[in-house]
Amino acid sequence: MISKGQQVIQQWYKQKNWQQFPFQQEMEAAYLSGYSGLLNAPTGSGKTFALFLPFLIDFIDKHPDTYTTQKNNGLLMLWITPLRALTNDIRKAMQEVCEEIGLPWQIGTRTGDTPAAEKQALKKRLPEVLLTTPESLHLMLAQKEYPKMFSGLQVVVIDEWHELLGTKRGVQVELGLSRLKALATVGGWQFTVGSGMFAEVSLQSTEKQRTENCPLQTENCKLKIWGISATIGNLEQAAEVLLGNTFPPERVKMVRANLEKKLDIRSIIPDNVENYSWAGHIGLKLLPEVMEIVARSKTTLIFTNTRSQSEIWYHAILDNYPEYAGIMAMHHGSLDNELRNWVEQALHAEALKLVVCTSSLDLGVDFRPVDTVVQVGSPKGVARFMQRAGRSGHHPGAVSRAYFVPTHSLELLEGAALKDAIKRGIFESRDPMLLTMDVLIQYMVTLAVSDGFRAEELFKEVKSTYAFADITRNEFGELLDFITSGGKTLAQYDEFLKVEIENGLYKVNNRRVAMRHRLSIGTITSELSIRVKWLSGGSLGTIEESFISRLKPGNTFWFAGRSLEFIRVKEMTAYVKKSNSTKGIIPSWNGGRMPLSSQLAAVFRDKLDEVAHGIEKDEEVIALKPLFNMQQELSHLPQSHEFLIESFKSREGHHLLFYPFEGRLVHEGMASLLAFRIAKIKPASFSIAMNDYGFELLTDEDIPIEQVLEDAGFFSIDNLLDDIQHSLNANEMARRRFRDIAHIGGLVFTGYPGQPVKNKHLQASTSLLFDVFNEYEPNNLLVRQAYNEALAFQLEEFRLRAALQRIATQTIILKFIDRPTPFAFPIMVDSLGREKLTTETLEERIAKMARSYGAEGFDKVDDNKKIRKPGVTRKKGF
């Protein structure tokens, strides 16, 4: 017998002429049985309804006769998303369901884009369902008497959990959930009711909980917690991280959609690979082929990997296909929010034929008119490509059609690897972040700003999270000491004495400290940005300060699809006017190119092994046959059990090229490590260049490479950390990581709205703090974190270690060559791109290099000079 709620929802399905998928039925049964867990479903499969509708059924079943008149119920569901843009679509879909079944509910949003008046209204009356972000959840926890706000909360849903996992925002979610679980635990923290609009609430534990040394137990937690995740390599671990260490395993469920998403993935192959770019990352030489696809499609999203690349493609399309003016738009994170919203609405309304975008449109926004996705350049990860491909055919049963556009020849093999990885179900894991003390410090002050916290209670809550399961009492004590007295080093400075202790309650009493902290809540850090506005009024978006600082009044630049003349900077705003000039520079944003993921790198090596064995089953491999034949003729095609090293001499010096095919970051660390180990055998200075396929060591000295390779320790992982410390400026890398850590941990204040602190002043402050800690408190937790992050994220030390272990088992193939090979040439081009000053274009320098090596046919590079506005030349490092 079905319940009243199920009857209502089944009738709604009939009215829509929809049917439940089996996974939606399984999700409904799991939810109504009281489980928490993780829902794994592909994009466009109906995963939002899979969780929202069971929640409605549960409410209707509890109020079968009055649900249509049940208003002002307080907050019942909290829905957390990683992107503010996602909340609009989800809210509309949820509100529509409520109206159609006669439920008089309000679905609200609270994000950084929510007007102040709406935020104030939310303090007085919360909707039944609130869509928010990790940062906004913490801002809610920073409000006075916040426990009352969550007193009726029944379920928390974390949407797109795979995007938050492995980031500090994900740790924010873990900490926020630990507090919500504690509030919802029967026999947990007790409420003391007083007077006022909200009942006065103080967090006081039972005596038993105060004296126990184990983390807070949540067997009696009334709160359901569900995550929604796309397919990743560690789904079980993702569920563990989400629910924490103390969630009863018998109450945890993994629901998998097991829907075979229909994918149509094709690579755009140049007519003549020999004449295609040997290096580069723009890809505009295939613009005509891309526009043929756009013309055949209803609506197309062209994904690029960087904001600069999206600006370049947008201008190139307008230059060469002016008929698309008015039916084409651009979307990336630096554009003004109003402009981005307009683009999203126009996509919904089928008013746009084409949008050039970045990761700002990666996640679950439902654009049903989109039937084609074009990915320009390798996405460097399988899961990222699947996410973007899923933007097309974004509804159950539809085909997701995606085209891969290589920006240089060897990227075609990445296209073949992508298709193979998807076919074999190989996806990246998202490794969780552990012991991020900067996030914990911020969270502790957040709680102190609101109602305060008691140390023992908070320690148990924090210890219950996956991120801080291994935190010790001594470490927690150091953090308490830090927020109350500045720790061992900063005790003499009042600005670091933020939290006071009153009868065991840790609390912020200073209103200025509280205000500054609320303004600083969050873990997203970036270079200081300048808002770009028309001189006549109206905002276009933001550009990093470092770019604007290089402009002079009268200079022209391209941004938000327009040619702009720079007028002046005033109060952190760059004022511009429209320019009719056909010349102009395109802004660049910090962040760099993404490295090849370990999973895609492994499949890439599998594909290369097939090539070496003469297997030609992929169209991409067949197209690349001339390139591979040339590589074999000049050097060697390595098989899976071989590791290729090439050596040759030129007027520049002695070139050594290594090909691990492990990704740019691993190669950066390995290049420095091996250069250091060579220098121990024969002292030498090296210039280093790398890409995702290999790296080059260039020196003036003759290197006895055979003697070096005879050393059994050359590729060894013995003394790896010590050698890394000596081979790289580990101190400087840690200093760079410390800038963000200091920001998140509240050591520096970035400024008030409209009055940010200049970037150079922030860098100077964090650098000084780093030096002080290093000298007087070398075991400081934040400094240790900086060094650990440098190893883990800048060098990918774990992958570096695994790569060295793999190479140590392979047969070394050393080839002495006369000129650069197809594998070598792109790496050497990368080194040209980083020269500091030149009057030649990159294309001219490459042609000169090719002539000097007698390498006819190698002067192909993807430099967008020919399609860019006349007279515009972009150079790195200039």
Image (cartoon, rainbow, N blue to C red):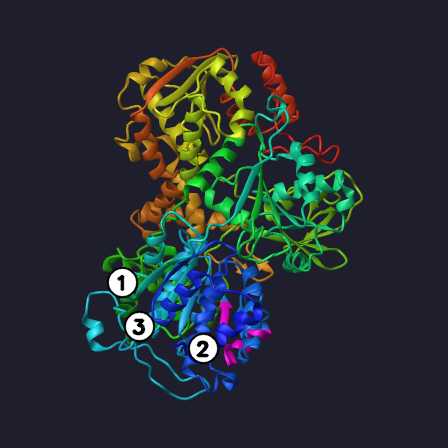
Give the total number of marks visible in the rendering: 3
Q: Are marks 2 and 1 in contact (CB under 8 Å)?
A: no
Residue occupied by mark 3? 221
Q: Quadrant of the N terminus?
A: bottom left
Residue 872's spot in the image, x, y percent? 71, 34
Residue 562's spot in the image, x, y percent? 73, 47
Q: Is residue 874 above or below residue 706?
A: below
Q: Residue at x 26, y 68 (%)?
A: 216
Residue 222 visible:
yes
Q: Quadrant of the C terminus?
A: top right
Residue 671's spot in the image, x, y percent? 40, 28
Q: Is residue 818 left or right of residue 191?
A: right
Q: Is residue 615 above or below residue 320?
A: above
The mark closer to the camera, 3 or 2, is: 2
| Figure quadrant of residue 718 | top left
Residue 501's spot in the image, x, y percent? 32, 72
Q: Is residue 626 left or right of residue 868?
A: left
Q: Earlier in the sequence, mark 3 or mark 1?
A: 3
| Figure quadrant of residue 623 | top right
Residue occupied by mark 1? 249
Q: Is residue 784 left or right of residue 858?
A: left
Residue type at tag 1: Pro
Residue occupied by mark 2? 5
Q: Which residues are magenta?
A: 117-131
Frontmost residue, 617 versus 168: 617
Q: Are marks 3 and 1 in contact (CB under 8 Å)?
A: no
